[in-house]
Image (cartoon, rainbow, N blue to C red):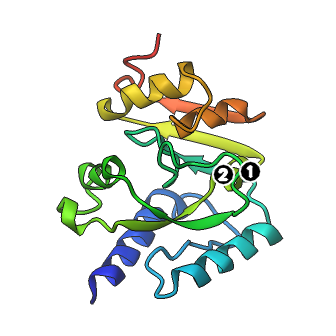
Amino acid sequence: MSGSRRRIRRRCCYLHKHLLSRVRVAAFHPLAGEAADAAAECRRYAALLAAAPADLVCLGIGENGHLAFNDPPMADFKDPELVKIVELDEACRRQQVNDGCFATFDDVPRRALTLTIPALRGARTVIGTVAGPRKAAAVRAALHGPVSTVCPASIPRTHANATVHLDAAASAQVV
């Protein structure tokens, strides 16, 4: 099995174990980040979102304040796209290793597919869950800094129905 097939399988297994095995859903449409034609995958997924906007977005906050793969300061709060190809910055790539998604920094792809900030904000409900001490500074910036692309995780503060759940370590710098 190729490395990209293992990543797809691992991602879907993770989602199945932690979410889909516990919550009954009518349909599940994963974004195939390892698709051979990334641009076509972005168009396919954007069409799904346009046809049936998300009711719920579950997200985390990256160590550098990113949401999905919308890294600072390249995140665009008014992006006209729903899904796009992005270049991952070094901090985001390092987090992929820190989170155990990849064994080494060199294994982490330089590009990824991501839902854009408008796609994430377009859901009726946004729920964030953040854990761990490596996220504490980003959480502080998201909750107390300006709403800005310097910390994309600050944008949920402008959503009418957003909730963020923090563990003690992630909230350590929140005053």
Check if mark 1's residue and mark 2's residue have beta carbons within 8 Å. Answer: yes
Say what amino acid the circle numbered 2 marks.
Answer: Leu
Q: Residue furthest front?
A: 74
> Measured along the vertical axis of the image, is residue 49 above or below residue 127?
below
The residue lying at 20 percent from left, 65 percent from top is 106
Left or right side of 63 for 33: right
Which residue is situated farthest in the right direction here?
51
Residue 123's disc is 1
**Left or right placement of residue 8 versus residue 100 in this view:** right
Q: Residues within 10 Å of mark 1 (few under 14, many from 20)?
A: some
Residue at image position (38%, 27%) is: 136
Q: Position of residue 129 (x, y in %)?
A: 50, 39
Identify the mark at residue 95; answer none if there is no mark: none
Residue at 66%, 29% in the rendered image: 157
Q: Residue furthest top?
A: 175
Check the picture and name the quadrant holding the N terminus. bottom left
Q: Amino acid at mark 1?
A: Ala
Which quarter of the figure has residue 20?
A: bottom right
Q: Secondary structure at mark 2?
A: helix
Q: Quadrant of the rendered structure where residue 116 is?
A: bottom right
Write the residue at 48% across / 83% down: 35
At numbered mark 1, what does the secondary structure look like: helix, strand or loop?
A: loop
Report the residue marked by disc 2.
120
Residue 112: % across, % down: 45, 67
The foreground one among 99 and 155 is 155
Q: Position of residue 115 (x, y in %)?
A: 60, 60
Distance from Cα at disc 1 to Cα at disc 2 = 6 Å
Question: Where 119 falls versus 60 (above or below)?
Answer: below
Is 133 located above or below residue 8 in the figure? Answer: above
